[in-house]
Image (tube, rainbow, N blue to C red):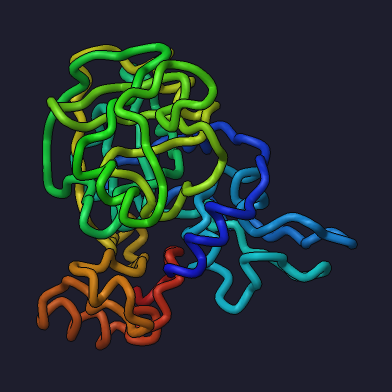
Amino acid sequence: MMRLTWFVLTLCAAVPSAFAVTYTLPPEGSRLVGNPIIITVPERNTLPLEAFAAQHGQGLSNLLEANPGVDPFLPKSGTRLVIPQQLILPDTVREGIVVNVAEMRLYYYPPGSNTVEVLPIGIGQAGRETPRNWVTAVERKQEGPTWSPTPNTRRAYAAEGKTLPAFVPAGPDNPMGLYAIYIGRLYAIHGTNSNFGIGLRVSQGCIRLRNNDIKYLFDNVPVGTRVQLIDRPVKVTTEPDGSRWVEVHEPLSRNRVEFESTRKVPLPISAAQRTQLINEGAGAELERRSGMPVKVGM
């Protein structure tokens, strides 16, 4: 993870920004939406995996989960990539903004519509966590936000030999991008000055989106909108036809040791839930963690 983050920060060129993926809300009692699609990496490819993620409204982590073994630096020409556009909606109220930090996705339910907009996000790095299990609201919005790094942030950069100014004015060089939606007192949903980090833990705790995506939210989300942040790497649904589906994401590391380890982070589920899912045939997916819905039983 550390090597991958370094690569994206230093080598990834600007890639196209995609708008949110729009889903029609399923009928009452259903939470399964969309379908996966498959694309083929073109001949003489020179783009990193992040570019294909951006083209299809996904984060880098979403494509890495769905395509294990694919080279994130330079996918081989002819490689078939699964785009995970099927998903299970979070088991919570379908209102306002819902952020599931574990899957690095933001869900926006436009009022009066029968749709949900799903956008990939970047979140706080280890030690500078994006809040989890929190209900708040949009406090204000700002076009052309400024950025004043905290003393701790400046010290952290200095320890790496980097110098941060005490104040970064609004503009294209501001790491908060061109739009910011402030939630609570200390956090923001904002853009970026580079198309990297979507689907990675690289921010100072805020929620980062590609520029077209934050522009869409800025234009459509009113002040006062409910915002809920959750941390659910395992989503399970029983559909109206009786089918059972499970969607498992790699959970966020809980400390620096887990973050830097190559071992899988334990799934935060109870022993009873684990046993039930294994009995239903989902044991392989609990280990695989593809980030895509898998049908496990009827």
Can you name the residue that lies furthest to the right here? 43
Q: 238 left or right of 13? A: left
Q: Can you give x and y, in whole percent of width and height, for residue 216 in the image?
A: 47, 21
Confirm whether residue 115 shows in the render. Answer: no
Q: Residue at x 43, y 65 (%)?
A: 291
Q: Nearer the viewer, residue 106 or 270?
A: 106
Classify residue 247 by image quadrant. Answer: bottom left
Q: Residue at x 16, y 73 (%)?
A: 269
Classify residue 145 by image quadrant. Answer: top left
Q: Is residue 227 above or below residue 240?
A: above
Q: Nearer the viewer, residue 199 or 177?
A: 177
Tell how many labels: 0
Q: Quadrant of the N terminus?
A: bottom left
Q: Residue at x 25, y 80 (%)?
A: 277
Q: Is residue 233 above or below residue 113?
A: below
Q: Can you give x and y, in whole percent of width and height, for residue 113 in the image?
A: 38, 21
Q: Residue at x 33, y 86 (%)?
A: 283
Q: Can you give x and y, in whole percent of width and height, for residue 77 in the image?
A: 82, 67
